[in-house]
Amino acid sequence: MRQLKVGLIGFSVCGQVFHGPFIKGNSDLLLYKVTARKAEQQAILAAKYPSAIAVQSADDIMNDPEVDIVAIATSNDVHYALTKQALEAGKHVLVEKPFTNTVEEADELIALAKEKGLLLTVHHNARLHSDFKTVKKLISAGRLGMLVNYQARYDRFRNFLRVGAWREEDLPGSGIHFDLGAHLIDQSLQLFGAPDAVFADLRKQREDAKTIDDFEIILYYPGLKVSLFGQMLAKEPTPRFALYGRNGSFVKQGVDPQEELLRAGVFPHEHANWGEEDVAIQGRLSLLEDGTDVKENVVSEIGSGEDFYRNMVAAIRGEAELLVQPTEARDVIRILVAAEQANREQRVVSLKGELIAY
């Protein structure tokens, strides 16, 4: 079968780190055109992807009949408009998370893709992270017994605002709850399905912060409390995951190693041990089994970000179901919108009957 040609819109950190390397490593794909307006971006593109064509505008990609897939790696405020334009141009679309900024926008795009007979997916690649895959396997094994508390977090330390960074501006879809919280919500939905309700505490904590830089989102399930956190003022490392069940607990330090390697310029297909965690950050399982205290490290699963584009190709060719359905990504947005409402009104907001994929 012929290679599918990808037009990548957005070649800042997201496009360079999370898309370009995986497209290059997939023999079924060709990185064909890339929006690279700045001289620095053009230099990186020429050095790492010499066959790719640098273009100045999204229209240069949308209007090219050679383009099969449009990958959108832009600021969140233009996800909806660019996705709609790409679908109307007859392209399959992969858009970065968060899918859109409103549920109505998400519903419209889902309907448009269905009408056009096109594939639409959202880059919830954290499903393929080593740490989450490990947690998912552990929960399935059932050794913790009935799970009563699940905690997941993305904590970082940057006590200053990045000049010129769109994520620091008060724009639609900005704030780390939409950025990092979207991953945590998607992971929770994958593990536990639809929650009954949500509460959120959203804050601006750094000096002169214009958008949310600290969040706590609580998802309510029968017998289970899911707590999702993110902040920018965590100088000391915090557990990535902490799970508490009636038989014991599991605590996971460290993060999936793929992003660090990608930021260092490593291509996944050229790295022999891609996605393997250092044993030093293996999770710790502590149980009471048959009256005996059991403590053991849990060998981490292997991160596999390359599976996202691999699945997309297979789905386009009719060989597999899409890994991330747009309806699933839409439900993430519904919860984020409800979380903002909960924070604004200082109350728990019901989600019953509001989700469509779970």
Image (tube, grey):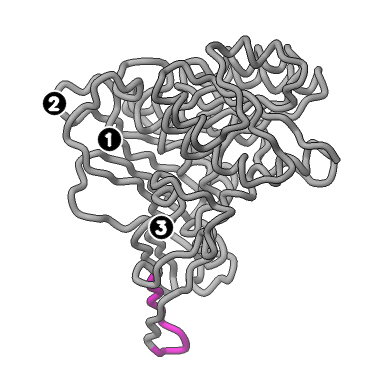
Residue drawn at (48%, 34%), measured in percent from left and top? 16
Direction left: furthest residue: 207
- How many marks the image carries: the answer is 3
**Which residue range is magenta in the image?**
283-292
* Crowd tier of the residue under label 3, counting other residues whose Cα lies within 10 Å: few below 14, some 14–19, many 20 or above: some
Camera-nearest residue between 120 and 143: 120
Q: Name the residue beneath numbered marker 2.
A: 207
Mark 3 touches mark 1? (CB < 8 Å): no
For residue 306, side relative to residue 161 (left or right): right
Image vertical order of residue 152 relative to residue 313, above or below: below
In the image, which is nearer the foreground, mark 3 or mark 1? 1
Q: Earlier in the sequence, mark 3 or mark 1?
A: 3
Q: Which residue is mark 3?
A: 149
Q: State the CA–CA distance, disc 3 to disc 1.
A: 21 Å
Query: Left or right: where does residue 6 sit relative to residue 291?
Result: right
SS under mark 3? strand
In terms of secondary structure, where does tag 1 sit? Answer: strand
Q: Is the residue 163 above or below the residue 228 in the image? A: above
Rendered view: 12 above or below 77: below
Residue 284 located within the stretch drawn in magenta: yes
Q: CA distance from mark 1 to mark 2?
A: 13 Å
Rendered location of residue 117, percent (x, y): 82, 23
Q: Quadrant of residue 141?
A: bottom right
> How many angstroms separate mark 3 from mark 2 (CA)?
33 Å
Based on the picture, tell me whether residue 205 belongs to the magenta stretch: no
- Amino acid at the residue labelled 1: Asp
Q: Label 1: which residue?
A: 214
- In x, y percent, where is residue 103? 57, 21
User: Looking at the picture, which amino acid does disc 3 mark?
Assistant: Asn
